[in-house]
Image: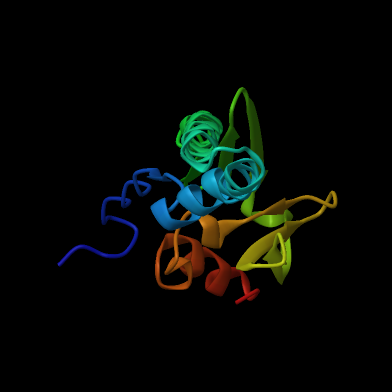
Amino acid sequence: MPTPEQQPALPPPEPTTYPPRWPVALMRAFLAPGLGGLVVAVLVDPWPIGLLLGFALAASFGSLTLSRARRRTLTVTADGLVLQRDDDALEAAWEEVTGIHRRRLGGLLPVEELTLDERRAVPVSLYDKAWRDGPIGAQLRASGIL
């Protein structure tokens, strides 16, 4: 039986990448364009043309926003988190996480964020609804934050 010193070290866990959750991405992409399209549909006369213009407005702006949102990812590694937003990446080590903050995004969507040292936040619940039970929660329990 090998002693603990003789046992091979476990390899670090593979990075886990989470895209934004579909309901979140759809709501954020189509809420404002949908409301704008509704206003156009009501204001333009005759109503079939207004309805068509409103639908086209909502579909075009919503699909552009959705395509940008789907390029965003949250990657969890053994060393920390990487939040990729368009061309910018926010990298944070686990030691930088200072707590958990709950708020509502746009006054509608409940969001749980990991607060970091430098007044930054990572909205983990937008990417993984069950983040407390996954690798993020395990790291935070190990550090005593969760």
Considering depth in this image, is 45 or 83 the residue closer to the camera? 45
Relative side of 105 to 129, left or right: right
Q: Which residue lies furthest to the right in this view?
A: 119
Above or below — where is 130 with respect to 40? below
Where residue 10 sits in the image (x, y, percent)?
31, 52
Q: In which quarter of the image is the C terminus?
A: bottom right
Q: In this view, does 47 lie above or below 27?
A: above
Q: Residue at x 49, y 55 (%)?
A: 24
Q: Which residue shows up at 62% across the image and 66% down it? A: 111
Residue lying farthest to the front in this orientation: 46
Q: In this view, does 10 lie above or below 64?
A: below
Q: Where is residue 144 in the image (x, y as percent from the top left)?
A: 63, 76
Look at the image and tell me in which quarter the N terminus lies.
Answer: bottom left
Q: Is residue 102 visible?
A: yes
Who's the residue at 40% across and 65% down the image? Answer: 134
Whole-percent x, y for residue 138 in the image = 46, 68
Q: Residue furthest top?
A: 87
Query: Which residue, as the protein is rendered here, is positioned at the far left?
Result: 1
Q: Does residue 33 sit above or below 2 in this rendering? A: above
| Number of numbered discs visible in the structure rendering | 0
- Which residue: 43% across, 53% down? 21
* Residue 80 in sight from this viewpoint: no
Figure coloring: rainbow
Which sits in the foreground, 45 or 91? 45
**Between residues 41 and 1, which one lies in front from this camera angle?**
41
Q: Where is residue 67 in the image (x, y as percent from the top left)?
A: 46, 30
